[in-house]
Image (cartoon, rainbow, N blue to C red):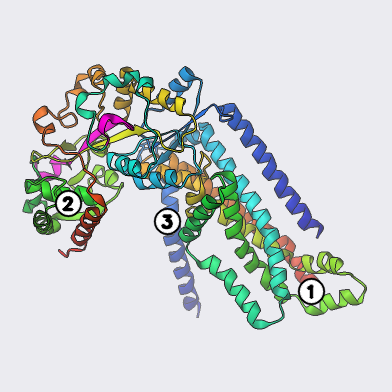
């Protein structure tokens, strides 16, 4: 009996000692009191030095948390119990959060740096008048490929993927809208097409692609393509930039038929405690110099016109990531198609996934 | 005769190689100066240095340990009381029903337990963070402790209790001087099981963390999703070594306390 009691007293003593050390560490880092700002962002999606700089400038202490999908982020915000002050969801998540009343409107007077954002990226259908959100990064969906493994051939269009020489060489990202959208685009239809005939046509066309598809994968697509496991991938531009960083042979192209234009925007969720701090942070991130450094670190395309001018020519002049006006005109933002249509897209995608070669 | 004895050994070795190869592969690359898991370029300790230089990570490690120790200790207490109660039940059917209710909690998927806790905490208005993680860890550890302690109680001869009562011991004396010492190995085993369960739990914790409170497994997951930094390998290696230490520690305690207890019974 004595030894059991001793064991438990020891365990509790150790636990409380560790708790004390943790609280010491926490306060040495400044994570105490109401002087904090919690930021909820995608993993590896900000230059960490900028956080330190913001902390010095504002006197606030930043708690930085990451999520890996819009859905996970929305669940955590929706169910409460958390205190995220700033979050950075994608555009379709923003329209959904708006519907579910999960966002606090932005006070534009507190965001003077908003004027640096390129006109093209303001006032978009998912958030008219930018009432709730300000663009953080944008990008496209396109084809990343390894010319060495294709005997030096270049890909320029979605229809190039149906080439017989690409048998079992293509990796697709696991997204219903991306893949169905690719089918629609390759036929010259809109990404947001809801015409049943067009959708069925796209589905038949995608079924013909299956012999070329090696796998439909998630985030690991980055490692697989960079590791030359497959020659071609359909990916988001930011992932492509990361792969090209890893493996210099790779090239990226936005297909000439057009593609998806996506946004990750900064918003203030309902759960925010430090609304002034959140505005200060958003305004800080909109500063041209800060935005330029962030864009250089993250590798995605910045919507900040003034920042773009500060970026070196090799980045801002790269048409793969900053496409020219002609191509940009063909890019479309995903519209919220409503629950039923979205479910239909998912069904079609599921049928495509189950289609036998 | 000799050759036939070797086959089982060979099989065992093969199985262990299959089980341990991925871990050793991961450990090997944690010393890679190359930066990826594709090619091994040279030996370095840089990834370990990176892990130790990260105060935030250190806080997360300490959080994990505090949660593991506290939840293991509290759930052991609750579990022992529970096991004693189940043992007391005379009617067989009721006892089986109680045991099944206990076992269902062990076999039900972590995801469901995690999701239901998330809903419960939200309804109850408990802020996600330290307390929600601690409560859920205690909750999923209790059934394990019960399962570890109960066999020891059943092994214990009822005559021991009768003899103690005969010799004038009251209920409290019987509990502290006879029952608890007898089931001590079970209690300690239960404690260590609860400790390891809490240390490596991911699914439940993933649901109920929030407000900047993270445990190591959740952190490793979110880092691994971003892919390709070998500091994850270094961190996993350290965690693996720590669990190995725990196992060895448990083994030593078990040996030390196990032998005299067995000898007593024989006498």
Q: Start and end of the magenta stretch?
A: A127-152
Question: How many neighbours does mark 2 have within 10 angstroms: few (below 14), some (14-19), or many (20 or more)?
Answer: many
Q: Which mark is residue A40?
A: none
Residue closest to the eye, A1 or B94: B94
Q: Is there any visible trace of residue A3 in the rendered image? A: yes
Circles 2 and 1 on the same subunit = no
State the quadrant of the C terminus of chain A: bottom left
State the quadrant of the N terminus of chain A: bottom right
Residue at 64% from the left image edge and 50% from the top image edge: B69
Question: Residue under circle 1?
Answer: B265
Q: Is there any visible trace of residue A170 in the rendered image? A: no
Q: Is residue B34 magenta?
A: no
- Give the x, y percent position of residue A272: 46, 34
Subunit bearing disc 3: B
Please say if A49 is above or below A329: above
Q: Is residue A146 magenta?
A: yes
Residue closest to the eye, A330 or B38: A330
Subunit bearing disc 1: B
Give the quarter of the image for residue B66: top right
Task: Kindly give the residue lying farthest to the right in the view shown.
Answer: B168
- Give the x, y percent position of residue A318: 17, 27
Q: Real-space Cα distance between discs 1 and 3?
A: 42 Å
Circles 2 and 3 on the same subunit = no
Q: Real-space Cα distance between discs 2 and 1?
A: 71 Å
- Give the x, y percent position of residue B264: 81, 71
Question: Residue under circle 3?
Answer: B21
Give the number of the mark in front: 1 or 3.
1
Residue closest to the eye, B43 or A230: A230
Question: Residue under circle 2?
Answer: A180
Residue at 19% from the left image edge and 46% from the top image edge: A233
């Amino acid at each position: 009996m004595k030894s059991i009691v001793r064991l438990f007293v020891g365990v509790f003593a150790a636990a409380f000692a560790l708790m004390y050390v943790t609280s010491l560490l926490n306060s040495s880092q400044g994570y105490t009191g109401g002087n904090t700002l919690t930021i909820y962002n995608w993993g590896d999606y900000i230059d960490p030095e900028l956080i330190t700089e913001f902390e010095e400038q504002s006197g606030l202490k930043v708690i930085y948390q990451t999520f890996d999908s819009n859905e996970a982020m929305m669940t955590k915000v929706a169910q409460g119990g958390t205190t995220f002050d700033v979050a950075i969801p994608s555009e379709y998540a923003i329209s959904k959060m708006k519907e579910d009343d999960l966002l606090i409107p932005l006070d534009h007077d507190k965001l003077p740096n908003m004027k640096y954002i390129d006109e093209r990226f303001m006032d978009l259908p998912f958030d008219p008048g930018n009432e709730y959100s300000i663009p953080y990064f944008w990008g496209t969906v396109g084809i990343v490929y390894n010319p060495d493994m294709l005997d030096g051939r270049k890909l320029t269009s979605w229809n190039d993927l149906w080439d017989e020489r690409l048998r079992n060489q293509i990796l697709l990202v696991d997204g219903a809208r991306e893949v169905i959208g690719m089918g629609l685009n390759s036929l010259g239809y809109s990404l947001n097409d809801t015409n049943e005939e067009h959708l069925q046509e796209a589905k038949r066309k995608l079924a013909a692609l299956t012999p070329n598809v090696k796998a439909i994968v998630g985030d690991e697509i980055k490692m697989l393509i960079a590791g030359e496991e497959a020659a071609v991938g359909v990916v988001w531009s930011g992932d492509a930039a990361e792969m090209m960083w890893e493996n210099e042979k790779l090239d990226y192209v936005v297909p000439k038929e057009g593609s998806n234009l996506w946004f990750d925007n900064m918003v203030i969720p309902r759960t925010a405690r430090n609304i002034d701090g959140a505005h200060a942070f958003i305004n800080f991130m909109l500063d041209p110099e800060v935005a330029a450094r962030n864009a250089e670190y993250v590798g995605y395309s910045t919507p900040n016109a003034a920042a773009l001018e500060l970026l070196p020519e090799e980045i801002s002049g790269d048409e793969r990531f900053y496409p020219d006006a002609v191509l940009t005109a063909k890019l479309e933002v995903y519209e919220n198609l409503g629950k039923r249509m979205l479910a239909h897209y998912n069904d079609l995608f599921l049928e495509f996934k189950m289609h036998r070669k | 005769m000799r050759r036939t004895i070797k086959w089982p050994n060979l099989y065992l070795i093969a199985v262990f190689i299959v089980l341990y190869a991925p871990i050793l592969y991961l450990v090997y690359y944690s010393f890679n100066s190359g930066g990826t898991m594709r090619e091994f370029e040279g030996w370095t300790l840089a990834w370990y240095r990176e892990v130790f230089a990260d105060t935030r990570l250190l806080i997360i490690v300490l959080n994990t340990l505090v949660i593991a120790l506290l939840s293991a200790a509290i759930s052991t207490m609750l579990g022992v009381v529970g096991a004693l109660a189940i043992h007391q039940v005379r009617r067989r059917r009721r006892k089986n029903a109680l045991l099944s209710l206990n076992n269902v909690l062990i076999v039900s998927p972590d995801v469901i337990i995690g999701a239901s806790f998330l809903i419960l905490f939200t309804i109850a208005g408990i802020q996600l963070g330290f307390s929600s993680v601690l409560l859920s860890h205690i909750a999923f550890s209790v059934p394990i402790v019960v399962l570890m302690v109960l066999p020891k109680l059943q092994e214990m001869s009822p005559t021991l209790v009768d003899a103690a009562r005969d010799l004038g011991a009251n209920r409290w004396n019987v509990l502290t001087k006879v029952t608890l010492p007898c089931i001590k190995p079970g209690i300690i085993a239960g404690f260590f099981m609860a400790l390891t369960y809490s240390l490596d739990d991911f699914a439940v914790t993933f649901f109920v963390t929030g407000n900047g409170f993270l445990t190591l497994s959740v952190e490793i997951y979110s880092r691994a999703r971003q892919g390709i930094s070998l500091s994850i390998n270094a961190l996993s290696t350290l965690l693996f070594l720590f669990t190995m230490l725990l196992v060895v520690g448990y083994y030593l305690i078990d040996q030390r306390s196990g032998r005299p207890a067995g000898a007593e019974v024989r006498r």
